[in-house]
Amino acid sequence: MTEIDAPLAIVGMTVSMDELIRLGIAFAAIIMFVAANAMGLVYAERKIAAFIQRRPGPYEVGPHGILQIFCDVPKLLSKQLLRPSHADPFLFWLAPVLAMLPILVLFLPLPFSPLLTGWNPDLGLLLILAFSGVHVLSVLLAGWSSNNKYSLYGAARGVAQNVAYEIPLLMAVLAIAFQHGTLSLSSIVDSQGSMPWQWNIFTQPLAFCIYWVSVFGETNRTPFDLAETESELTGGFHTEYSGMGFGLFFMAEYASMVVVCAVAATLFLGGWKGPFYDGVWWLLAKTYALLFLMMWVRWTYPRIRIDQLLTMNWKWLIPLATLNLIGTVVLMKVL
Amino acid sequence: MKIFKHIADLWSLVVGLLITGKYFFCKKPTVYYPRQVIEPERTRDFRGPIELVGTDADPRLPRCIGCMLCVQACPNNCIRIEKAKPAKPTPEEIQAMKEAAERGEKAGRAAASGASKVPAVWDYDYSLCCLCGACVETCPVKSIAFSHEIYLASQNREDFHLDLLARLRRKGGQLCSGCPNSDSQGRQPGQAGTKQAAAQTARDERATGKNNAEARG
């Protein structure tokens, strides 16, 4: 295969034709995976919420309401896209797109299995951390351009929260990177064993706890959904969005949940490895188990105040993550 | 050490998760109306639209003595009662009155036949009712009670103008199916107590409402 000058050649890299094809297939698969997951997870979330509250949830459309989502999606798709009269049109419509697009990139370096890896760069972990930071920009743009005080409040909270929670998240992930001496997700999976006690959660339990708390802040999920807070800010940063403008934010939220859970499964729970028959099913099972836990948490705990949220981050998570990181470094040097 | 207490308090998070986790798996109490209805005995505590209570002698006739206290007590004016005209005095009564007059006793018609204590019309506009229960508390003869009608629903405002006398006749006919004067609308005794009874009553009510509307129109 001949080497061609691809867009990536700008940064001094060359990409071969089959790598480009592989990337194209990976993106197509990722988009389908994200869309299917968003639909399935909305249904799952509604059912789990209902069951926890002793309700049946969606029940009337199809057996046990399984077809409910096929009513909701056309509704979202066909609704009129409204823009407030004094909103900035460019930034207003840029925000939902900016929320969705970087999420797709996050799936690229995830090793679903040795074969099912879109792209395996040496800096996969860094890629995920860098692109997940774009999400906060979309929250800010949406809140700012909506020309609505509630949206602006939501955006301000979202930024304060996202910026703060990125730090302990990063440090928890760094501890794993230091332990294995690599930022490649595939290498981190390779260095974990098949058996549960060989997974990183046993060598880095504190890092896992810090990571798990931080992802709630990063994905704006209850109890840390202060950027949305439908009871106080009527939806926060996405108050003014209708139809698929809101739909994209919604999809981005569920897609980012899948990403953080898949990354947690990869870094801490052995990725696609399991006690028997290694493969993609192990990663999916772990990811969905973590997603279930995330929804379970959402429907159990009340939303906390912004000062409590930031206090918890700055006074607990960051010091703990720092200690954990220092401990890991010292241990790695000594051993 | 305060810090250890904070860490120990984290256990409450697990307790919360266990509680919601338990609810996740427990049986759901939802009843899928209209495919299912709840058993009548479970509606016993439900205080629905008011209904008349029949006398012990004849459950198809109300205890109501037409005193109008409930009409005055009702904050929303949703009760309308019209008393029956006093029965015409029989010839014997007229004779007795005449005789009494001749004896110089002051005896009007009222003394002979008595003022009517029987309500002829007992209309109840449920669309106005706030279910405060003032009428139930006021009634001196305990003729008004909250019904346990939980499935009363309609898209037609007229359906909530209830004729409680007709309702009581139907209900009383149900209770004493052997009564010779049993209302033709009264349901068969076999239907009482079945699961569909509540829904059936709701349908009856709607039918009654339509009849009333026709009668008014």
Image (cartoon, rainbow, N blue to C red):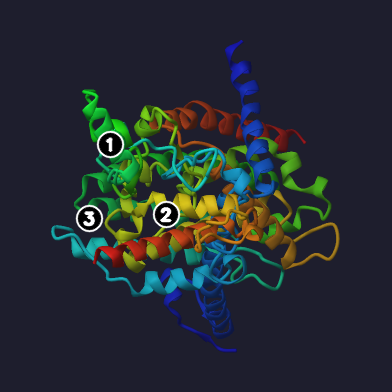
Residue B48 at x, y percent in the picture: 45, 44
Q: Neighbour class for label 1 at 10 Å: few (<14), some, many (≥20)? A: some
Identity of the amino acid at label 3?
Ser
Residue highlighted by disc 3: A145
Identity of the amino acid at label 2?
Ala
Q: Is residue A117 above or below residue A227?
A: below
Q: Is residue A77 above or below residue A275?
A: below
Label annotation for residue B166: 2
Q: CA distance from mark 1 to mark 3?
A: 59 Å
Element type at mark 3 = helix
Quarter residue A153 falls in: top left
Tell me whether the residue at label 2 lies in contact with that at label 1, contact meaning CB atoms closer than 8 angstroms: no
Quarter residue B65 falls in: top left
Q: Earlier in the sequence, mark 2 or mark 1?
A: 1
Q: CA distance from mark 2 to mark 3?
A: 64 Å
Residue A327 at x, y percent in the picture: 66, 31
Q: Is residue A304 above or below residue B59?
A: above
* Residue in the image at 59% along x and 38% along y: A210
Q: CA distance from mark 2 to mark 1?
A: 19 Å
Q: Neighbour class for label 3 at 10 Å: few (<14), some, many (≥20)? A: many
